Amino acid sequence: MTGLPPVTCDSLLAQISAYLDGDLNGSACAAIEHHAASCAACGRVIEDFRRTTGLCRTAATAPLPADVRARARARVLELLKRR
Ligand SMILES: [Zn+2]
């Protein structure tokens, strides 16, 4: 029991925005990983982040390169549009 609200696809994408702004804390990151593990669509997004940025390891310690951020944001927007 963590007391955290369940992560949905929409909230995960919203939190990715926070992550891209360097504003994601450790427990939010863990909740995202938990959801991504059981959701194929989000898992692919997270997997891409892991490869390029090291989600949950570099969060809030190093700003992402602008091109990585732009690419990730475009990906998130594309996913939101599909809903
Ligand atoms: Zn999802």
Image (tube, rainbow, N blue to C red):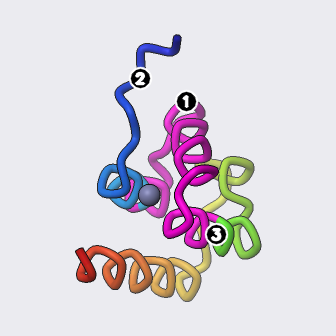
Magenta highlight range: 17-46
Which residue is nearer to you in this view: 60 or 83?
83
Mark 2 near mark 1, Cβ–Cβ under 8 Å?
yes
Q: What element carries label 3?
A: helix
Please state if 28 lies on the left or on the right of 83 as rendered. Answer: right
Of residue 29 and residue 81, the one placed in the foreground of this image is: 81
Q: Residue under circle 1?
A: 27
- Amino acid type at circle 2 is Leu
- The numbered disc on residue 4 is 2
**Pointer 3 local density, CA inside 10 Å: few below 14, some 14–19, many at least 20:** some
- Indicate whether residue 16 is drawn in magenta: no
Total labels: the figure holds: 3
Q: Residue 73 carries which label?
A: none
In the picture of the structure, the residue carrying the numbered disc 3 is: 49
Amino acid carrying label 1: it is Ser
Image quadrant in which you'd find residue 13: bottom left
